[in-house]
Image (cartoon, rainbow, N blue to C red):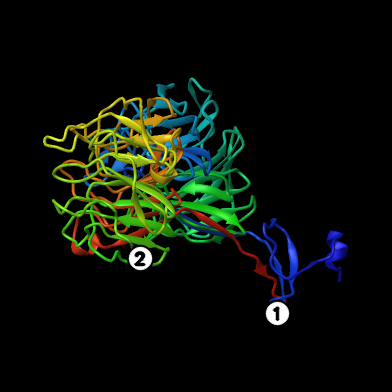
Amino acid sequence: MSTYTELKGLKVKYLAADPDPGTAGDVWYNSTTYELKAFVGRPAWSAGASMGTGRGNGAGFGTTQNAGAFAAGQVPPGATNSNLTEEYNGSGWSSGENISTARRAIAGTGSQTAGLILGGVLPPGPGSRSDATEEYDGTDWTAGGDLPAGKAYNGATGTQTAGLSIAGLPSPGAESYEYDGSSWTAAGNMNTDRFESNGCGLQTAALAIGGTPPMTAKVESYDGSSWTEIADLNTARTGVGGNSGTQTAALGAGGYVATPALSALTESWDGTSWTEVGDLGTARAYAPGSGTSISTLAMSGGFSPNRSLTEEFNNSFEVVTAGAWASGGAYPVAIQAGAGFGTQTAAVGAGGAPPGDVGLKTFEYDGSSWTAGNNMSRTPTGSPYKSAYTSGSGILTAGWAAGGGYPTAVDNVENYDGTNWTASAVLPATRGGGNCSGPQTAGLYFGGNTGSPPRSALATTYEYDGEGWTAGNDLNTTRQNSGGSGPTGSQTAALCFAGNTPSQTNKTEEYNGTSWAEVNVFPRTASYIGYAGSQTDLLAFSGYTSGSASVTTTTGYDGTNWSTRPSMATSRLMYHTNAGTSTAALCFGGEGSTAVLSSTEEFTGDTTAETGSTIDFD
């Protein structure tokens, strides 16, 4: 028998701990655990951020896991046709331009910046089928050449300039059509009539997977002129999702099985046979994807218990844990409209508004529990809201808080050193409902209100050096109760979004140390939004939209675009307090039940961990 050294030309490494970082194919002996180990791929699905609008029966396209798109589809309840487009960036979904005509049961292919959608069911459906083709450049949709006939529930694959339409309704059919970037021409017929078949690959090297009727396990390959039956799926299915991979390395996931019932089964194709790999977290059908057979975004939308769910597939020795909110230690008193700053494991909460016995109290968080610190320094007389609507920024050992108060605002500014609060130079004017951003020695205070009825919104900006104030240039839009960049912002890179003008706005502005500039708008018109992060990497959560109930919505900003993130566990309407960063955020208190007023939630971003497999000779 050959030895490892003879086969590989290398000796097995003898290590006291698993290597970090690792490389796929590494083999070593762990002398601490007495195990022979290797880094080998493990196929598995993990949760991704939800779509903005859940829907199924739409068109998916994209060539990588971090650059996919989903257009049109069917929105519950009532199976309403959609014209929406959303794009995925590996972290969340953002809105793209609407397609020209709302439809469902539509096919898609291509990349996020060169996509193609075709066919679909039009109102009143299902007999009304579209022959329309639309092309996407990552920004705009334009009309392409019409299909030779109206199609629905057809498959598609290829590129924007070399696409393939596969079978579909009416009939069901066996016909396929090829696209050259401007027009469609008839191509070879399939061996088996079908619709609801999934396609992947290229125009000259494609696969068609499953379909109905009857529900089939048949798979066919296309060489640019004719179709050939190849190895069947292990389980007959229709509405298989995935759309990922090539003719020799593909992935098919979910669908309906014979009952019919939604399936979570995933099968991988190696060019010869299908092998069952890790199941989806949530069974679903008609959910397209984007990527390859070993790294794909899939199951965005689809028919499932929750049509907004996204899942990511990886065949890797790195175990991916999706970002999520989790409960933290309860705040010692009911708090709303308090000041917060610091990190997730070294945070400060100070002041706030009743009904809790907040007063001027300060509490510090160590990542698991809150402990009492020394009170704020402002005079605790007058209104019980003296310390409410105050904004804070900085870190636990060098924080600061400014403004606040109700019904009359104050100009108080205080610095915190991790033990005591010390009065500092007052704001140039009384302010409430404004925003602090940046460190104690290079901060900003912007927006807010005059502090006296009718508390008109303002656009003023003030720069703080830890001891005094100078005027900066105004915001473009007056606002109060807006979101900002908080402790990880800076005097030369701050963010202001949403808020009351007095009506609610979705406008977003960035500050460069000199002036404010409008950038892409926040996805909602809202105010009182929680936030954590920087100008180029921010998390925004919960908040109030006029007429709505409390929400758990979480959104991310990458310095250019806003996109979805995993939702909070506890809905909060407004007045919640925040600290931390985009990948380690903290939210506590807020308007709601008694439980909400003292609850804490922690957000942890996506994490990966390298896991070595033990080689067992038994």
Residue closest to the far left: 453
Q: Residue at x 29, y 39 (%)?
A: 426
Which quadrant of the figure contains the N terminus?
Answer: bottom right
| Frontmost residue, 404 versus 253 | 404
Which quadrant of the figure contains the C terminus?
Answer: bottom right
* 1 vs 2, front mark: 2
Q: Earlier in the sequence, mark 1 or mark 2?
A: 2
**Gap between marks 1 and 2 measured at Cα:** 51 Å
| Frontmost residue, 48 versus 482 | 482
Q: Position of residue 284 (x, y in %)?
A: 39, 54
- The kind of residue tagged 1 is Asp
| Frontmost residue, 588 versus 141 | 588
Left-right relation of 589 to 532? left
Task: State how many labels appear.
Answer: 2
Q: Residue at x 75, y 67 (%)?
A: 28
Q: Secondary structure at mark 1?
A: loop
From what the image shows, is residue 269 above or below residue 125?
Answer: below
Left-right relation of 128 to 519? left
Which residue is labeled 2 in the image? Answer: 370
Q: Position of residue 505 (x, y in %)?
A: 25, 33
Left-right relation of 428 to 211? left
Which residue is labeled 1 in the image? Answer: 618
Q: Position of residue 443 (x, y in %)?
A: 40, 39
